[in-house]
Amino acid sequence: MDVSVKAPAKINLTLDVLHKRADGYHELEMLMTTIDLSDRIDLTETRGGITLDSTSGFVPFDDRNLAYRAVALVKERFGIQKGIHVRIRKNIPVAAGLAGGSSDAAAALKGLNRLWDLGLTVEEMAELGLELGSDVPFCIHGGTAIARGRGEKITPVAPPPPCWVILAKPPHGVSTAEVFAAFQLDQVEERPRLDRMMESLERRDFGGVCHELSNVLESVTLVQYPKVRRLKEKMITFGAQGVLMSGSGPTVFGLVQRENLAKRVVNGLRGFCRQVVAVRLLGGLERSPLDKKRLK
């Protein structure tokens, strides 16, 4: 028996760190939305154990991999003796701030829920997912939502208006743990205005969404990694209408409404960054034939 599940990437439209909690984690408030860039997780039942392979050489094949850990968690929690082989068909860049690993783990949980007929609700899968990482509950829910707490409190909101998302990732990765360790709230000059972002989403106001993009972790990553800052500046110069770093970085995204402008921004960035692609938003919207397109 086998199951195949899509694992879409996400971007942060807003990301705020409210304070450091007594348990050592940071209290977060993030507005995230899914995009049309996905891994695919294939789960095949075996006689025993957990094995994993991937189309990417940058993916670990052991318990450093969140999809591997998702399988191990389900097997332990439900006392399942059967084995699973996990194949990750990788399209989302690794260590990019796009929740690729978290989305893979969420897809593994969804796939095992189907494969082994566990009968878990979305909320129960999200609760399991929180044991794996802060972004996994959102990736279980998908669409467009605010995630609060460590990421476990999910509130669905209106999706952004349809547009193109240009993604540009520098060659180096960024350690999320190191970014949070260096983060100082009193060094943040501008905080997200979540209420105004939500108003823009409700009005389907593309200009308003672009204006309210905000990520407090830029105060660390753009300083420690000047290439990320320069990439953001270049994307603005080439005409992207709203530009922000996603998550802890290093990927920078730009929003544009017109396909010809998306092509122009992509072509301009290729002189500065090898990993550049334009995709469509998903965010919970019904997909049209246009959504199947990706600019190369």
Image: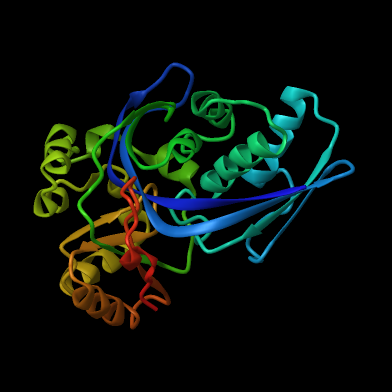
Q: Is residue 1 left or right of residue 98?
A: right
Vertical position of residue 281 compared to residue 278: above or below: above
Residue 233 in the figure: left or right of residue 166: left
The answer to whether 112 appears left or right of 190 in the picture is: right
Question: What residue is at 53 percent from the left and 64 percent from the top?
Answer: 91
The image shows residue 128 at horizontal and vertical percentages of 58, 27
Q: Residue at x 72, y 23 (%)?
A: 77
Quadrant of image for the C terminus = bottom left
Instruction: Decide: is 175 above or below 131.
Output: below
- Left or right: residue 47 versus residue 105 is right
Specify the quadrant of the image occupied by residue 183: top left
Image spot of residue 174 (x, y percent): 46, 54
Asked whether the viewer can see residue 70, the reply is: no
Q: Is residue 4 above or below residue 108?
A: below
Place residue 89 in its image quadrant: bottom right
Q: Position of residue 249 (x, y in %)?
A: 39, 53
Q: Nearer the viewer, residue 108 or 226?
A: 108
**Number of marks:** 0
Colouring rule applied to residues: rainbow
Residue 15 x/y as whole percent? 29, 40
- Please report the residue visible at 15 percent of the width from the left and 53 percent of the height from the top: 210
Residue at 76% across / 31% down in the picture?
A: 75
